[in-house]
Image: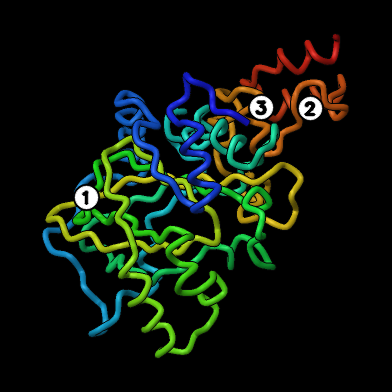
Amino acid sequence: MAAAQSLPFTDQDVAEWDREGVVLIHDMFTPEECAAVRADFDKVFGRATGGDQALDKKQPGRIGAFHPSQFKTIEIVPMDCSPALNLIGVHPALIAFAKAALRTDAVHLYQAQAWAKFTGDSDYDQPFHADFVNHTLTVPSEDPVKNSVTIFSYFTDVTDAHGATHYVRRSDSARIAGPEATLNFDPEFQAGLQRDLAKVSRSAASPAGTSIAYTTDVYHRGTNLTAPNGHRYAFMACFKKAGDESIAFTPWAFHNARPWARIFNHATPEQLACFGVQPPGDPFWTETTLARAQARYPGWDLGPYRAALKG
């Protein structure tokens, strides 16, 4: 599936993701889109400034560890803010990349969350890890298109002092260990694995508007924020092929108390389909289901769905 010329990524980007499991795409979003998303981050998290000193909890000789405090400033969609942040995870460019990478015409968004980090709130240094352990109950497929694609996007300029993600390309990690090595919890084994992966790792430090697309077998890690008063705004959107029940993270209906009208009132049918909403023309839609859906979301424009029913 070729990437359209008007999109902010190329066929070569898709090929690199397919080959290496990870690719950086600069200028995925315009400066105007980034500014609107940043304004929503400011509103949702209530601040844009971190502390003046970094928190360092690392043990000597260790790269990092997971701490609950690293994840305290995460919010899933929908959020009490404008459509800019609520719909950035289903931006047309992200949907297009996911479809191209997974070679399908129908993708499902199974994780979408805003992640703000602030200097001093936590020691954000993590060990290298692969995400498959909490995205599937099995293991990554040898066929990349049978996995999923995570698109992690920056909306502030991110240097290594602002917690840039570090990653290891698949061709480099293959010489060290497969993703299953992340399941070996022996401390000495992990210490050696982390040292070896660090030698071939790369920094994703990039300007606002950059996306890092990677799959669940790719080793990566979060790094600490050390910039005085620093902060980092990022958004994670995870896509799978529609109908792939082996991959999951967020059951959207479980979070029905969140402000879903913020999404339904502004999203296109293609964007809503990424959340699992039946598209126009699907047999699910009848006069009764349309009336009930309108009652649940009075501001939802059901015109395309009604037109497909009449057609």
Q: Quadrant of the N terminus?
A: top right
Left or right, residue 140 beside residue 4:
right
How many numbered marks appear?
3
In the image, which disc is placed on residue 297? 3
- Give coordinates of residue 269: x percent, y percent: 66, 24
For residue 85, which quarter of the picture?
top left
Residue 124, x across and y down, in percent: 31, 65
The disc at residue 292 is 2
* Element carrying mark 2: helix
**Left or right of 139, for residue 119:** left
Left or right, residue 251 beside residue 30: right
Q: Amino acid at mark 1?
A: Thr
Q: Are marks 1 and 2 in contact (CB under 8 Å)?
A: no
Q: Residues within 10 Å of mark 3 (few under 14, many from 20)?
A: some
Q: Nearer the viewer, residue 16 or 77?
A: 16
Q: Residues within 10 Å of mark 1 (few under 14, many from 20)?
A: some
Quadrant into which the C terminus falls: top right
Q: In the image, 93: left or right of 228?
A: right
State the residue at coordinates (26%, 63%): 224
Q: Residue at x 65, y 60 (%)?
A: 142
Tell me, for residue 159, which label it has, or none.
Answer: 1
